Image (spheres, helix red, strand yellow):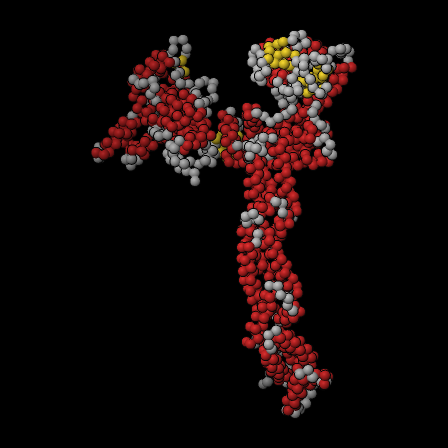
Amino acid sequence: MSSQKKRNFKIEAFKHRVELDPNYADRTWRVLEHAIHEIYNHNASGLSFEELYRNAYNMVLHKYGEKLYTGLVNTMTGHLKEIARSIEAAQGGFFLEELNVKWGDHNKALQMIRDILMYMDRTFVHSSHKTPVHELGLNLWRDNIIRSSKIQTRLLDMLLDLVHRERTGEVINRGLMRNITKMLMDLGSSVYHEDFEKPFLEVSASFYSVESQQLIECCDCGEYLRKAERRLSEEIERVSHYLDVKSEVKITSVVEGEMIANHMQRLVHMENSGLVSMLVDDKYEDLSRMYNLFRRVPDGLSTIKDVLTSHLRETGKQLVSDPEKLKDPVDFVQNLLDEKDKYDKIISKAFNNDKTFQNALNSSFEYFINLNNRSPEFISLYVDDKLRKGLKGVSEEDVEVVLDKVMMLFRYLQEKDVFEKYYKQHLAKRLLSGKSVSDDTERSMIVKLKTECGYQFTSKLEGMFTDMKTSIDTMQGFYSNQYSEIGDGPTLGVQVLTTGSWPTQPSAPCNLPAEILVICEKFRTYYLGTHTGRRLTWQTNMGTADIKATFGKGQKHELNVSTYQMCILMLFNSVDRLTYGEIEQATEIPPSDLKRCLQSLACVKGKNVLRKEPMSKDIAEDDAFYFNDKFTSKFIKVKIGTVAAQKESEPEKQETRQRVEEDRKPQIEAAIVRIMKSRRVLDHNTIVTEVTSQLQSRFLPNPVVIKKRIESLIEREFLERDKADRKLYRYLA
Amino acid sequence: MHKSGRGHRDKVQQFMAITGSSEKAAIQALKASDWHLEGAFDVFYSQPHIRTVTDSRHLEELYNRYKDPYVDMILVDGITLLCNDLQVDPQDIVMLVISWHMKAATMCEFSRQEFIGGLQFLGIDTTEKFRDKLSYMRSELKDEQKFREIYNFAFGWAKEKGQKSLALDTAIGMWQLLFAERHWPLVDHWCQFLQVRHNKAISRDTWSQLLEFAKTVDLQLSNYDEEGAWPYLIDEFVEYLTENGIVQSHQN
């Protein structure tokens, strides 16, 4: 039984069974073969495209695609071999030209052939997975021409030779080069790469290796970099003219590697022309070039940065340690500002405002400014100098600029609390002696400090300004009040200072002259009348006085002196001669101050309103002082008192530092307690880290001091050590 | 009855001599520790003591013997007499141990409570019993744990009433005394260092940490940890030792 189920009806496609003449294929092929020959022989004009196309079409249709294809391959190969021979035969420079011309011909031929065989391309080639005609044509060219043993090496050698010649200054035929390389690219990027690019890069590497060796021996750094830069742009130009665009990054990295990366260290450290001398001499162009070249290679910029940093630290260290430079604080700070300006300019003009370089600059400055522990004092003195007189005639914007620059230096300070102490002292002197040029500028500086350090830093400073203002109002009130019947008596100007805000300099008041005492008492009564519960103490070591004096020939002068000096001088209203001992007794001025006052009144040329016997500078108990009748000066107003701020003497400095250290102890303890209160249990190292970070805006605490404070807190039973682990501390509520 | 070899008998004798215990207790402890003396000590001391009952009348008598005529305390004279009775030098460290048992607040004086309470705890109500207990008390210094307690007790006991810190001279004296019992070779350098560099009173923290230092850090300071949160005086002492070449520096 046949298992014939439903039969699916299939309608078979109508097949035109044409019985072909078996020679048909051969004949048709020969027509086409002939056509190909003609095409290659530049005789294509006599051919009929339509006829040829039809022939090809028929062959494929009748299943002779294979024969057609094979025939194509063979014919083309044959022609190509001939072409190869003619290229090989070309002499010298004509080799490339011949190659170029033949390539052009081949492409044209290929195009025509492809057009003719288009049907085969679309059907037979496609279904039998053969290489399409155009591609086939390229491959055959590649295999028979480019990769032919007699051509391959010669081609490469020629190309490389041309490049070399161009590199050494000759002019070459760029158009021809371009065509050749384009040909290689058309044949496939691997052909371009294997047959040209790879060897090109290798040869270039050795070329530049040799050249860089030569140059580094005979050029200085700037010259070398100029040459390297030029080579780099040459190569880029070369690529744009006759190489594949993808070669650019490869060749530039070869140049960068050979010329820059391999010689980086030597260049940077070159004596008399390397990075350091460029920095010293502000060679912006050279520096900029170095920056742009080095940034192309790995570690290039970090190399520059490292040398920059160590140079900065070296020179900075010298700036702050050289005893010559330390003599004048204002110069000292000016040097720092100039140095900062110099490098800011370098970084902006040559280093592209690179942030890592900015950071290197900042960290170097921070490093060396803090090497000298007098930096805070000196910076304060610089500001003092500027606020005192240095800004007359300078516009307000310039003032702001200077102060902003000083603030940058301030930011680098680790011991900001030391600065605060000095700033307070200097500000007090400025305010009290009326020597501040501009109230606005003073205020502006305070605002900057407040922005930087917070309210606490400046609250006391602001208190000082308030006192000054209030004092003006107080004086107005005093003089308009019935309490004051001055008449011929001395005019009094009082500044009432709130104790907490001003730097304290305890001193016992000296004996004031009677006339002064009277009006002082009047003031005291007035003031305490309006402010109960306060206590006033005269600070006789801080005041000034203007005295009218008449000398021997009737010359009148107005003397501006300190309060102490006034007390001394007034004594001479009743007596002509006084010994040191008598003056001391009468005035009760402390001896060291008294001696200094007498020296400035009697021993300084142009200011000697007193005469001293003997004339020596030292002051002994029995030395006698006389009113100097013969005193002359071309100025009506003579200034004798010295209230200007100066850098401290060694013992004063020690004292200030000690006070700063003492002030830090409670701050450290407060920080420890705060931290322990919130964390309850903490190990030693963590406490030190936390404390340091909490206090860093004011100063850098010493770990040993922190440890001592911890032990003190243990003793006072704020903390205890953990019984099992010595390194752990507990907060005791 | 016991099959003790010669060696065992020696150990028993040794044990009894050091701890002042009975033979029975000695054998018991040694057996428990497999006849190792060190272990036996541990066993012995960790046992709760059998408190012998004391006669409170006798205690009163004893107290009154030493008590000061004007104050209800035993003061210097009384203590001298006590030492005499015990045939012990007043500087003998066993006095410290006694004070520790009595939880005495300050050296050179005992309150009624301290004296009587302490003796009760120790099971002493006559001078003979007191004398007998002395060797036991001396032996307690050999125990690590007890030594530490006694050492730390000594700080509070030796310092002036009302002071937070211990005067340097007193501290040095105490250290000499204590480190004679538990040998620390650096004690003399320590005392010298303090006199030269510090010359101030000693805090409690420094006192107690010093013992830890002596116990844990070796004589070449090779295991001294700079980050070990030692009191700063001890850090300075280490510096002093390296500066003066007493110890080789380990810094590279």
* Percent of width and height locating residue B171: 41, 23
Res B83 → quadrant: top left
At horizontal 41% and vertical 24% (from top left) the residue drawn is B195
Q: In front here: B243 or A293? A: A293
Image quarter in which the N terminus of chain A is found: bottom right
Q: Quadrant of residue A561?
A: top right
Pick whichever, A650 or B124, lies toward us. Answer: A650
Does residue B24 show up?
no
Note whether residue B228 is visible.
Answer: yes
Give the farthest residue toward the top. Answer: A574
At which x and y percent is residue A380?
63, 30
- All told, the count of numbered labels is 0
Above-or-below relation of A312 to B200:
below
Whether residue A410 sits left or right of residue B124 in the image: it is right
Snapshot quadrant of residue B108: top left
Q: Is A176 above or below relative to A337?
A: below
Residue, x 39% and y 23% (percent of image)? B172
- Which residue occupies 38% across, 28% down? B189
**Image point (72%, 17%), residue name:** A558
Q: Is residue A293 above or below residue A675?
A: below
Q: Choose between A447 and B100: the one closer to the eye.
A: A447
Of residue A391 and residue A356, the one placed in the foreground of this image is: A391
Give x and y (percent) for residue A600: 63, 18
**Quadrant for the C terminus of chain A in the image:** top right
